[in-house]
Image: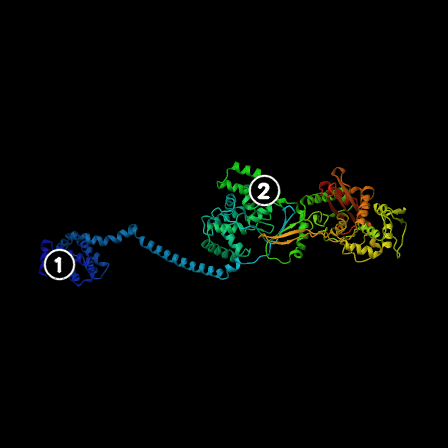
Amino acid sequence: MSKTTGGRKGGGGSRPRSTGTGAASRRGGSSGSSPTRSTRTAKTTKTAKTGPPKAAPKKAAAKPGAQSSGKGAPARPSRAKPASSPKATAAPRKAPRAKPAGRRRAAAPGRRGRGRGPARPRLALAWVALKWSLVVAIWSTVALAAVVAFYAYDLPDIQAATARTRPAGITIQAVDGTPLAVSGEVYGDPVSVDTVPPILVQAVLATEDRRFRHHWGVDPVGVARALVANLREGQVVQGGSTITQQVAKTLFLTPDRTLRRKVQEALLALWLESTFTKDQILGLYLNRVYLGAGIYGMDAAARRYFQRPVRRVTAYQAAVLAGLMKAPSRYNPAASPDRAHDRALEVLGNLVQTGVFTRAEAQRIAAEGRPSLALAQGTGPDSRYFADWVLSRLDGYVGVFDRDVVVETTLDPAAQAAAEAALAGVLDDPAVRGRGATQGAVVVLDRDGAVLAMVGGRRYRDSQFNRAAQARRQPGSAFKPIVWLAGLEAGLTPDSRIDDAPVTIRGWSPRNYDGRYRGPVTLTEALAHSINTVAVRIAEQAGRDRVAGLARRLGLTGVDRADPSMALGTVEVSPLDMTAAYAPFVNGGHPAFPHGVARVTARDGGVVYARLREGDPPTVVAPAHVRAMRSMLRRVVTGGTGRAAQPDPGRGLTAYGKTGTTQDNRDAWFVGFVEDRAGRTAVAGVWIGDDRGRPMDDLGGGGPAADVFRALFERWRP
């Protein structure tokens, strides 16, 4: 204590106290919390009372107090009693040497107040944001996993889906291999990326999925691009599905547009990408993509639309095939060649954008390739009447089958085109339309009954009812050759005379078409002028049962009654059957059974069915009677009611046949055959009328039907 008091004389006693205070502060304790410090402060205050008064003691005493005011209460009394002695001032003056430590402690709050204070709140806020971000991310992951698990729970079984059976596909071809129609799901030969032309792969990728080689099954970039494009256009103009997603949808899913299906599609796409290579996935796509008209896969489409396997398609044809994927029905080259061409131009434009072609090259390819679209047209849309008829009878040929098959038919594309054009030309004539003729049918057969052409109506797209095979109409006078043939079998000859005079049977009195009666006439003359009274008398003389039986032998199975009016063709028959009944007059008296299937083969090359020809069937008409009937039918064309049916003499064809009209002109017929100088023949039947059976104006003994017959053989010859 004496050392401390003695320090007042030199003023240096304050240095050890300041040093002690600084040391205490550095050790972590406050000046106010130390008993030693409190004692020293009290002694300093007591000593200061005896010193000389100065103005500085208040400030000097405050500094030690400031150091301890933040931590302990004992420092406050030293500031509350400022010293008035001069000696009390001397001690604080020496304190600045201890000031650096005090400044370090006092400066920190001041610095925080000058701009560094917000650092700690910012760090706290960042920590809170990070913490909540992690929480949200974790729960989002959990929610996503739950959604995925929910939709993955009922994913289809992969093995069951890939082994799923499908209906057998049927491809119907003309006699020259021209495709006519397809039924069911038709697939071509399996192909791979290595076996198709590179331009086809490039066209598909440029049009359907340019990032196919870079994404992992689902393409967020493509989805975003499609979304922007659709929002900009205000409608769906672009899809975001990748090729992998489309394969997943084709193989495993239904076409439903639901959230569940889209999630499952994405999951399956990821699985496909992890299981197969990119080329394998693309190969699946090329084999399974739907391309319209029941056709699946590039090879089947190439064969259907361009009559060649896919490995031989040109650049333009590849563009057409790639363009089909967007909307197969809309861009079908068989039904809409102009739209198909416009779409092919878009695909070629995509190939220009991806650097495959220059613009000049694309324009040249389009110009050179467009004519090949004609291959997709086949023989015209009306050949579908024939295709429908073949399909309806196919089970009778091959029964139940579970393989894709090709049906090789007897249809001759040239004859079919001629028949369609001939019928359309007559029905489009304003004079014919003005008389009430709105519909028609044409059938062309060879000598054995093979169908060479079949037109079932004016336009297939307007009506699919096949009037050639399904309609049953009264043939009128076209039935009379069967009555004349029965007369020959009963002993009459072409020169036999029958009285053309009024006749009444059980109160029924038929009249002739022109109202005239000629008296006794030969059978040849009576048939040429289609005399009704003679027909009734021949049927009565030969026997109505004989007439009905002969009709059935010739294939008219619907003739099951034998009333007197049958002689005038009041029975109901189809144009197909009526035409076949004339075939024995061509083939030497053998029955002809209409047929359209020549052979059925499976995709693997096996023959499922083949029509065998084991010689002619037994005759149903005696050869002598065949010659007599040919002579009389020729006279109908040269000097009777059928003169309009004779083709131009320059064609070198000789025509035979018979006209037919029914009561009130409800039906007009011509059935006959032609023969060229080499002996080649064909039989044809034409019907003109109205589906509702409304009467037509005077047709002049079946004139429009005879006009169709003539036009047909002026366009085509057997």
Residue at x 28%, y 52% (from the top left corner): 112
The label nearer to you, 1 versus 2, is 2
Residue corresponding to mark 2: 341
314 horizontally vs 377: left or right? left
Q: Earlier in the sequence, mark 1 or mark 2?
A: 1
Quadrant containing the C terminus in the rendered view: top right
The residue nearer to you, when weighing 112 against 671, is 671
Total numbered labels: 2
SS label for mark 2: helix
Q: Residue furthest bottom?
A: 35
Q: Secondary structure at mark 1?
A: helix
Q: Residues within 10 Å of mark 2 (few under 14, many from 20)?
A: many
Residue 420 rendering spot, x and y as whole percentages: 70, 45
Q: Which mark is residue 47?
A: 1
Between residue 411 and residue 220, name the one nearer to us. Answer: 411
Q: Quadrant of residue 64?
A: bottom left
Residue drawn at x 56%, y 39% is 366
Point out the residue furthest to the front here: 615
Q: Nearer the viewer, residue 333 or 716?
A: 716
Q: Is residue 21 above or below residue 654?
A: below
Task: Give the image location of residue 266, x and y in percent.
Answer: 48, 55
Residue 80: x %, y % from top left: 20, 59
Q: How is the image coloured?
A: rainbow
- Asked whether, in this view, residue 429 is left or right of residue 525, the answer is left
Three-letter code for the amino acid on which mark 1 is drawn: Thr
Labels 1 & 2 near each other (Cβ < 8 A): no
Q: Is residue 567 visible to us here?
A: yes
Residue 290: percent from the left, percent from the top? 56, 51
Please name the amino acid that badge 2 sits on.
Answer: His
Residue 701: name its quadrant.
top right
